[in-house]
Amino acid sequence: MFSDKEVAKIREDFPMFKNSPKVFLDNAATTFKPQSVIDGVVHYYTHTSVNIGRGDYMMAYHTEQQVENTRSLVADFINANPKEVIFTSGASESLNLVANAYGRQHLKTGDVILMTKGEHASNILPWFKVAKMTGAIVEYVDLDDEGSLSVTNFKKAMHNKVKVVAIAHVTNVLGNIIPIKEITKIAHGYQAIVSVDGAQSVPHFVTDVKDLDVDFLAFSAHKMLGPTGVGVLYGKYEILESMETFYEGGGSNSRYDICGNVSYRKPPHKFEAGTMAIEGIIGFGKAIEYLNKLGMKNIEDYEQDLLKYMLKELNKLDNIEVYNPHADSGIIAFNVKGVFSQDAATYLDSQGVMVRSGHHCSKIIEDIIEASDTIRASIYFYNTKADIDHLVKALKTTTVENCVGLFI
C-alpha cells in the first residue's frame, strides 16, 4: 500500500506526467512508461543495436545475455522456469500461438473449446478459426449479470468432450477476477488444458503459475510499463516440448535438409523464429525490475483502495449507470444516461480526462450487460484520488448539449 506522498514520488519517474496535464484512465489499453524503461530502449539503439544469436562478437553476446536476463526476470515474476517463457509480439500473438500450435494438433471433430462471452477478441477469434479447421465446437460458460463466473456454473459447463478451456483471469470490460485456480483443478479432472489470458491480471497482482497450475498464460509488456511489441507466452515445459511450431524461420531450428526434414531447437527457442523485438525485451526487463522494486502486493493493495473510492464516487452520480458496481479489479464500465459512449468519452477528453469507449474488443458481452458499448475507466498504481475526482467532476457536466457543443 502506498501513501499519497509515495505515489507523488512514483509519478516523478514517468515523463508522461510532466508532458501531459490530462488524467489518464485508460490503463487497461496500455500504461505509461517509467524513465528506466525508456532509457533501456534508447541504450540499446545508441550503444549496441546488434542482432542476437547470430553474431560471433562480444556486443552480440552481451545483448543476447540481456534478452536472457529478461527471460529469467519474467520467469521469476510468475514463478516459472525460464525455459517455459516464450517471447512474442504481445498477448494476442501468444493466444494465437496456443490456438494454432496446440489446438490444431490436438483438437478433432466433436471436441469442445470452453470459454465465456466476456473474453477479449484475441482469446475468442483464434479458437473460432481453429474450431472451423478441426471440427471442434465452441461452448460458453454462463456468467451472472455483472459478468462474474462462479465455480458452480463452471462445474455445470464442464463435460468429457471439453479439451480446452480458454479464459481470461481478469475480463477486460467488467474487470471480474475469475477463480482460475479452482477452474483449472476442475478442468484437469476432465483432462482438459487451461489457457489463460493474463493481459489484465499479471500487471496488477501476484501471479504464480505453479500455484494456479495453468497450462498456458499469455500477457503483454505494454500493459505493465513495458514497450509495445513484446508479449509472453508461458507454457508448461512438457506441453511446449511436444507442441508443434506455428511460425517458421531462422533461430527456431538447429538444422534442416533439402528433403524437408527439420530438427527444432528446444523450447522456448523453437517458438521464437526470426528477429525478436530486442529493444522491447530489454525495456521489458527494466519494467519488471521497476515493478519488483515497488512490490506487487503493494500495487494490488493500493489499486483496491483506489477502486473502492472510484466506485463510491461514481455511484453518487444520478446520470451514471455502472455495469459492474461490485468490480473486484481496477476496471469500471459505465455509461452516461442518454449520451452515446463515444460522445461522452470525447467530451471527457475536452475536460482533461482520457478514457476508452466502445466494445473494447469484446463484442458479445452485450448479451450479458445489455449494452452495446460502454465507457471504460481503468486505473494503475500511479493514479490518484485526485484523478478520480477530476473524472467525477467532468461527468457531472457530461450532457448531450455539451457533447454537441464540441462539434458546432
Image (cartoon, helix red, strand yellow):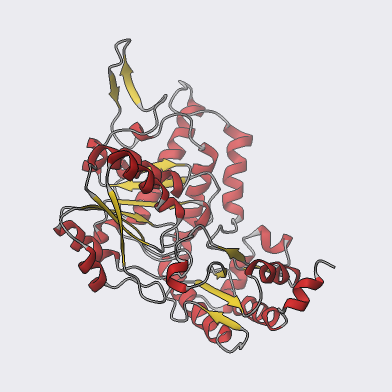
Q: Can residue 102 be seen?
A: no
Q: Is residue 170 left or right of residue 21?
A: left
Q: Position of residue 30 (x, y in %)?
A: 56, 57
At 34% from the left and 39% from the top, the residue drawn is: 100
Which quadrant of the structure image shows residue 69? top left
Q: Which residue reaches farthest right? A: 408
Q: Which is nearer the eye, 283 or 235? A: 235
At 42% from the left and 76% from the top, the residue drawn is: 146
At 44% from the left and 51% from the top, the residue drawn is: 122
Image quarter of the C terminus = bottom right
At 45% from the left and 54% from the top, the residue drawn is: 121
Q: Position of residue 370 (x, y in %)?
A: 48, 73
Q: Is residue 362 left or right of residue 210?
A: right
Q: Which is nearer the eye, 378 or 156? A: 156
Which quadrant of the structure image shows residue 145? bottom left
Q: Is residue 109 left or right of residue 6?
A: left
Q: Position of residue 164 (x, y in %)?
A: 26, 51
Which quadrant of the structure image shows residue 263? top left
